[in-house]
Image (cartoon, grey):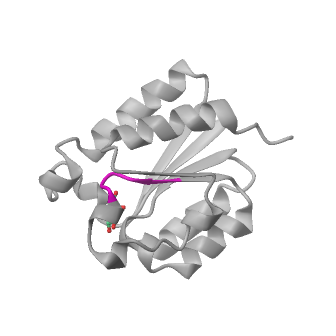
Amino acid sequence: RSILLVNGPNLNLLGTREPALYGSTTLPNVISLAQSQCDRLSITFSHIQSNHEGVLIDHIHEARSTFDAIIINPGALTHTSVALRDALLGVEIPFVEVHISNVHKREPFRHHSYLSDKAEAVICGLGVYGYEAAIEFAARCLEPKEK
Ligand code: DQA
């Protein structure tokens, strides 16, 4: 089984960016926790963070024959990107959408997601624990692709 963790724009600033909303854990911390969690679960783990929509889309395309599940925090692209939605649908890899903050408690423009109606699950407001919860869920629920 294999999981690709995708983090979108500005998530490289995790730990220093609006800590009241996103906490003090850095992205490298998140990645290393996710890596150890996947090691324990015997899941192959890989990750990508980019501030560029096209780079994220390219990585999602490349994931097609390689990954069983995607865990994605698309950042602000959640609320804007039909292209990211189409990429995820195009590769037919089940995905879990994660938001560190509770987007529903925030500005109205954050209440709509272009991905949620196609996601296996949506997690928001759990802080960075949302990533751990998503991996746990993926490990339990997502069947490996027939090779
Ligand atoms: C976010 C929520 C988005 O609205 C915002 O643009 C982000 C992070 C979250 O993790 O809470 O960049 O996806």
Q: Nearer the viewer, residue 116 or 16?
A: 116
Residue at the limit of the structure toward the top, as seen here:
40
- Residue drawn at x 72%, y 63% is 91
Q: Position of residue 109 (x, y in %)?
A: 35, 79
101 inside magenta stretch: yes
Specify the quadrant that holds the C terminus: top right
Q: Is residue 57 left or right of residue 6?
A: right
Q: Is residue 31 left or right of residue 115?
A: left
Q: Position of residue 19 (x, y in %)?
A: 14, 52
- Residue drawn at x 50%, y 41% is 134
Q: Which residues are magenta?
A: 97-102
Q: Is residue 98 left or right of residue 27?
A: right
| Residue 1 in sight | no
Q: Position of residue 52 (x, y in %)?
A: 41, 73
User: Where 81 sits versus 87, above or below?
Assistant: below
Ligand 1 lies in quarter? bottom left
